[in-house]
Image (cartoon, rainbow, N blue to C red):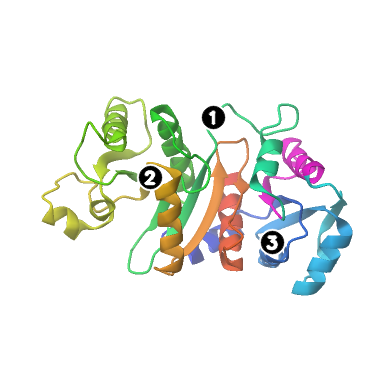
Amino acid sequence: MIKAFDQILKAAKEKGPKTIAVAVAQDVDVLSAVNSAKDLGIADVILVGDKDEIEKSAEQCGVELSKFEIVDIKEKAEACRKAVELVSTGKAHLVMKGLVDTSVILKAVLDEQIGLRTGNVLSHVAVFDVPGYDRLFYVTDAAMSMYPNLEQKKQIIENAVTVANALGNDNPNVGVIAAVEKVNPKMQATLDAAELVKMNKEGQLTGCVVAGPFALDNAISVEASKHKGITDPVAGYADILMLPSIDAGNVLYKSLVFFAKAKNAGIIVGAKAPVVLTSRADSDEAKLNSIAIGVLMASV
């Protein structure tokens, strides 16, 4: 089981290269990341976007463009459609967001004619390597699903499980997070947690062990769990942290990045192919890590 990002990069080298179609590729940080992925042998790259602007951005970050295929499309929405089409027709294995709004690229991903829709919920999975812990954490959903209902939460967990599986965790522990660790009829997150646990026990939600509701501390800390008298075997050992809303997910995501200095990656799952989608505030390293996870998922 992969437990750190250096292992992810090593595994991606062994599985790669896979071809990435970058939508609206005239972005300095994204070009730097795909350049590193190319040099490491993780990925081949097709840059889709305004060729003149791509050349300007490449000059800024010292990237040699001769190693990449470039598809010159000026208009951003059309560039997104082309990048997605390259994946849907098998010419590329995953798509990556460049200098374009998330809503624009997702519209292309969900296009009925050339898109990658499956009918499942699309959700974001952030992967964190947190100092002091012996495993990776999968945080979902911090960027895509705003206020998911019970059925959507079930699919969000299933999506996160596919990411954990791609990284060698065959039966991840899922901690369903709420503000408290007891079911409270006035707190919907705790009611949903109890239902998700029931689904797991009855075989409706498989490939993982679901427990909760947990407050964050007793999902990740054995000591905190013991102090509160929680005996569930998942307590303190959660791999996947299922957050109740985008508010909680986004705050945890940014707290781990900026306070904990955790290494991170992000990817959208639920489509026919991985969608590498990172925050503009994410580092080049985070973007490279995200590409590596996308390569591993495309190799499954």
* Disc 1 target residue: 120
Q: Nearer the viewer, residue 132 or 106?
A: 106
Label 1 sits on a secondary structure element that is loop
Q: Nearer the viewer, mark 2 or mark 3?
A: 2
Label 3 sits on a secondary structure element that is helix
Q: Position of residue 141 (x, y in %)?
A: 46, 45
Name the residue at 52% across, 45% down. 124
* Disc 3 target residue: 30
Disc 1 or 3, which lies upstream in sequence? Answer: 3
Mark carried by residue 243: 2
Q: Is residue 297 left or right of residue 130?
A: right
> Label 1 vs label 2: CA separation?
19 Å
Label 2 sits on a secondary structure element that is loop
Q: Which residues are magenta?
A: 77-98
Whether residues under marks 2 and 3 lie with C-beta atoms below 8 angstroms apart, the answer is no
Residue 86 within the magenta-colored segment of the rendering:
yes
- Alpha-carbon neighbours of circle 3 within 10 Å: few (<14), some, or many (≥20)? many
Q: Position of residue 224 (x, y in %)?
A: 18, 57
- Alpha-carbon neighbours of circle 1 within 10 Å: few (<14), some, or many (≥20)? some
